[in-house]
Image (cartoon, coloured by chain):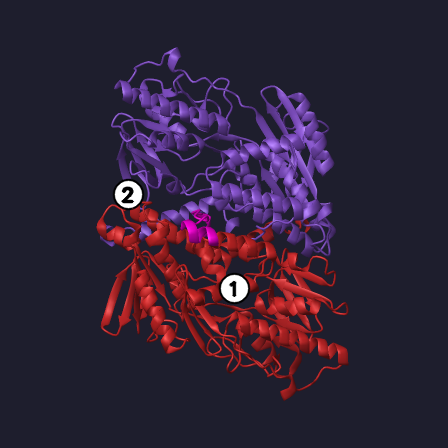
Chain colours: A purple, B red
Amino acid sequence: MVIGGGFGGLKVARRLARRRDVQITLIDRVNHHLFQPLLYQVGTGILTGGQIAPALRDLFVGRENVRVLLAEVTAIDVDARTVTAVAGGTLTLAYDTLVVAAGARDTYFGHDEWERDAPGMKSLDDAYRIRTRILSAFELAETAQDDAERAAWLTFVLVGAGPTGVELAGQIAYLARHTLAGHYRRVRSEDARIVLLDAASSVLPSFRERLQRRTAQELTRAGVEIRVGTTATRIDAHGLDLTTPDGDARIDAHTVLWTAGVEAAPLARNLAQATGAQTDRAGRLHVATDLTIQGHPDVFAIGDMVTIEGVPGVAQAALQEGAFVADLIARRLDSNTTPPTPTPATALRYRDKGSMAIVGRSWAVADVRGLQLTGRVAWVIWAAVHIAFLVDWQKRAEIIRRWFWEFVTQDRHERVISYVSLLPDELARAEVETVRRRTARKSRR
Amino acid sequence: MVIGGGFGGLKVARRLARRRDVQITLIDRVNHHLFQPLLYQVGTGILTGGQIAPALRDLFVGRENVRVLLAEVTAIDVDARTVTAVAGGTLTLAYDTLVVAAGARDTYFGHDEWERDAPGMKSLDDAYRIRTRILSAFELAETAQDDAERAAWLTFVLVGAGPTGVELAGQIAYLARHTLAGHYRRVRSEDARIVLLDAASSVLPSFRERLQRRTAQELTRAGVEIRVGTTATRIDAHGLDLTTPDGDARIDAHTVLWTAGVEAAPLARNLAQATGAQTDRAGRLHVATDLTIQGHPDVFAIGDMVTIEGVPGVAQAALQEGAFVADLIARRLDSNTTPPTPTPATALRYRDKGSMAIVGRSWAVADVRGLQLTGRVAWVIWAAVHIAFLVDWQKRAEIIRRWFWEFVTQDRHERVISYVSLLPDELARAEVETVRRRTARKSRR
């Protein structure tokens, strides 16, 4: 059984699905695999949700040994070897081997009240929310009735200058300077102020110094204002309070986006309690070198919800861990054994294939096995790698066409403001719960 | 000033925009023009919102004499010649000539409580909601724990067999029989029961008898169960109570969609109160033969919010009315007069260009100037007409490609279940109101 259809979980399921002797149940809270590296393009109107999120079920048509369930796992009983999940009703599902790959979610470092005014971007619903916020801000600037109000609507602040923050900042700058130029009468979208801040001393803190410097230059050229060494101390509907190297400051902004940090999905804590495993500060599980939970050789945990020395929380790591676990399970099945303790021979060897980030339309940084690239060349590699890792051919073709079109015309298709998308996820969760109760068999009422 | 960016309002604005001597303000509650005839394809996962809904602003780039405002009109003062609209704050806008084209919305004939369990499809948010409902139903059937529950999730009821009901029924049947076939393990999507009901004695009540009969045959062949002469007397989360020619009946269904009837937008009542104009049972305004409000030669009303003898509430009528009004305004400007009373020479002459509806993938009915067509031929005409009326070339090309792809592979791209989309519009309206209050200038707090 695999919990989670992200990069890690999907890899395990697809790799093991080829074997006729394996019955796989893949459980996810959502019905799609999300190609997260391109999520920011959904958030800024280039791509649609469907283009980067194939239905999980679609990927296993014809694989009769794979069962995909849309359900939320609420408990894991490692002694009884069962998983409890809620769909329309509550399901109890038995497993022989369990792979938990539930991923990560945004963390507000103890300030959950900031979520309302500074939404993060982890899911498609998040991306639609951010798209509606960004596009609405320009509209509200156009109808604002005084200068201060107009300026607050034209100010966009990104808290966190990792790859997502850099990419979103570059995209918003591009939207303002190019895509939306000439669209408004009372305001010039080109006057938008885009502020990218980070507590670290540079943008892209995990990258090498030269690439950091070049990225900062390119962002500045694109019109992004960078503030490093800067921490948000309060976020509300009107803007945010900051602690900066030059003292305290305030930015009036109606659009603040959270790109600062992630923590493990809540299921990690669940699993830690059930197994006695340790977690780190971000709630990520410590796992054995073979990615099992210590003392539970039939329970694996992979991806963003675990912490492994020297392995970053990125898609390629989840993919490698997924492949590793699938192969390990296959070997166990072939040799008909369950090794009680991991050996060096069964340890994951992580190969860093490099990291990349994109600024604006056709400028990227890439650090690929020691090779530090910037600009158009890096962008071509970026585009090739991202297209290559998409799961289906038709989506690849359509995304290439959209990129090409956007490149030529600077136009973006997906500019629909959806008010419903503004609503917070907790309301959606409450609604799903209400639907569940209301549609439960009448006999049970 | 034009209120509403649907077919009618957009036509007026685009036609008058060519004149340098006209200043146009186009106000809409949403930021896009919606190509409603293809909305059902968004609702069933073929197209994306962006493909059928260009941003209104995009259509007037370079037209400095056109101002597009995202705002909701709340009052019209015909004496002061002002319109009150709410955006971030409240705006008061003056006009010389006013064209009100606010459209229609679903009506539940006094049973507004049904909206929750039987959503309608007028907006993009509605279409996303319906898409999520339909796709979730199959998922919940897969995880249902008893047969009755499973059957209720696999039963889809459409209340109202006009073009939208027929098109949606055909699409759900196609999804179940083809697109989703083989995707589930515990259920067969092909077993889904799709019921199309109408109080009238036939499907497509506004079409001619031969086309009604052929459509009913085709729907039946596609797997749709037709129940005519049937009225819903109660709708809840578990299904609906019916009055049928054979007595009362009950259908257990978790997915009920409302395709039954529309009424004029609330602004029609507003305008009626302000001007003393009469409205019909569906709240639609009676207008003079030149489409002005009687006694108010500078206030026009067009499209689905008005009722004109012999003119149906369809897109082509709104387009013709928009063109007529734009030309009339242009003539007035040229002759520098405001004719006090309409004359026969200034009366709208409606030309019925025919009506069409589509069933499933490549079968349509068309009644074009006396020519009654069915099947593949009608479908080709349907496709050509719809493509021709789309507003931009790139969207045309992408839609054709998607149709072609779907035709060849039976696959559909847009299958993302978005829980947020399930939330009702009134919550979204409340959220927009909250955002408005929270982001209002601090000084005003």
Which amino acid is tagged 1?
Ala
Q: Chain of mark 2?
A: B
Q: SS class of the residue under badge 2? A: loop
Q: SS class of the residue under badge 1? A: helix
> Residues in magenta?
B404-422
Q: Which corner quadrant of the image does residue B395 belong to? A: bottom right
Q: Chain of mark 1?
A: B
The residue carrying pointer 2 sits among few (fewer than 14), some (14 to 19) or many (20 or more) residues within 10 Å by Cα, namely some
Q: Which residue is mark 2?
A: B185
Give the x, y percent position of residue A245: 70, 27
Give the x, y percent position of residue A281: 48, 23
Give the x, y percent position of residue B382: 48, 65
Q: Nearer the viewer, residue B11 or A243?
A: B11
Q: Is residue B179 magenta?
A: no
Q: Nearer the viewer, residue A210 or B149?
A: A210
Say above or below: A292 vs B287: above
Q: Which mark is residue B384?
A: 1
Instruction: Give the alpha-carbon distance from disc 2 to disc 1, as whole Å.
Output: 39 Å
Compared across the picture, whether B442 is left or right of B128 comes to right
**Do tags 2 and 1 sit on the same chain?**
yes
Decide if residue A369 is in sight here.
Answer: yes
Which amino acid is tagged 2?
Arg
Q: Residue at x 66, y 48 (%)?
A: A409
